[in-house]
Amino acid sequence: QVQLVESGGGLVQAGGSLRLSCAASGSFFSINAMGWYRQAPGKQRELVARIISGGLTEYADSVKGRFTISRDNAKNTVYLQMNSLKPEDTAVYYCTLGALGNFYWGQGTQVTVSS
């Protein structure tokens, strides 16, 4: 069993910032990657950012320069610092973990950006 517990979502005005956290616990070995996806109403779920073992990062074009993903390996926690938020960033954000061929999802946290 793997549990991903997200926190940090909420309501913010355009131009503001939020920091999402996701703590992983349970039985897993050798994390390959942790990341964040999001899904806005009526849209498909999309990759926002991920960080791969070794520290390599990948971002969606829409968030490059505004969002930063980081990871605390000792705590099995991944963070997403979101700056200069826009109304189009409004979505449910899901934490993900990939380990040894398995892929896990968190329950999601709502981020709402008002104009």
Image: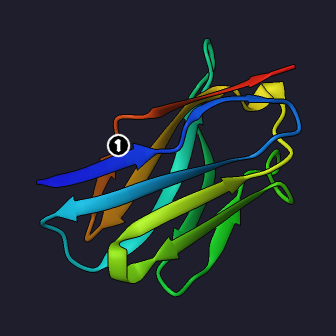
Q: Residue at x 42, y 55 (%)?
A: 22
Above or below: residue 38 compared with residue 55: above
**Element assignment for label 1:** loop
Quick one: quadrant of the N terminus?
bottom left
Number of residues whose C-alpha sits closer than 10 Å to that of mark 1, classed few (under 14), some (14–19) or many (20 or more): many
Above or below: residue 37 compared with residue 92: below
Q: Residue furthest top?
A: 42
The residue singled out by tag 1 in the image is 106
Q: Would you identify the image quadrant in which residue 25 lies?
A: bottom left
In this rendering, position of residue 52 left or right of residue 64: left
Q: Residue at x 41, y 52 (%)?
A: 96
Q: Nearer the viewer, residue 114 or 49?
A: 114
Above or below: residue 52 compared with residue 14: below
Q: Nearer the viewer, residue 107 or 115?
A: 115
In this rendering, position of residue 51 left or right of residue 101: right
Residue 50 locus on image (x, y percent): 57, 62
Q: Residue at x 79, y 27 (%)?
A: 88
In this rendering, position of residue 41 left or right of residue 13: left
Residue 15 locus on image (x, y percent): 88, 38
Dot 1 amino acid type:
Gly
